[in-house]
Amino acid sequence: MGGLYCVFWHCKCISDASENTFKERYAKWCKKHRYNYSPAKAKEIYDKVSNLVSTLPKNDTAKLLVIQAIAQLNTVAETLATVMAEMHRLTTLLPEYDIVMEMYGVGPTLGPQLMAEIGDVRRFYAKKALIAFAGLDSPPNQSGAFESKS
């Protein structure tokens, strides 16, 4: 667990030092972990952290809680990536895959989700039928003898 959060896990790990001291420590960390160091990014981090008020004390118990929470978030992110990859793999086997993937703005994340939500897109005769199915079309704007043109 030699990530950024183990070195700079609490805002006081950054704000208790001077800006130059933090920049030096951050530069060493970047070099060690083969990240591109940017003085502007270091300044941005320092400036933002300097305005924070922590609700957790800077002690070993709090550090353990933070590190465990980050580990759990990383596990959830990895699991989500695995599920999304499997959804994409399975949808490539369906006949409507090419149709959905050709839609403007649809990629490997949105495509499988759309297919799961709407089923076989080929059952819609036109774009407007799919839009109506999704409930995105506006209702007619008319009353009595008045009928809107736009």
Image: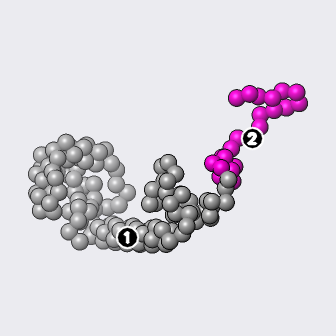
Image quadrant in which you'd find residue 10? bottom left
Quadrant of the rendered image containing residue 107: bottom left
Would you say 121 lies left or right of 66 here? right
Residue positioned 67% across, 56% down in the render: 124
- Please determine whether, in this image, residue 7 is positioned above or below residue 146: below
Task: Give the residue at mark 2.
Answer: 139
Residue 20, visible in the rendered structure: yes
Scheme by which the image is coloured: one colour
For label 1, the residue is 78
* The N terminus lies in quadrant: bottom left
* Residue at 81% across, 29% down: 147
Percent of width and height locating residue 121: 61, 59
The answer to whether 68 is drawn above or below residue 126 in the figure is: below
Query: x and y percent of residue 23 in the render?
Result: 14, 49
Residue 67 painted magenta: no
Question: Which quadrant, please, contains the C terminus?
Answer: top right
Label 2 residue SS: loop
**Amino acid type at image mark 1:** Glu
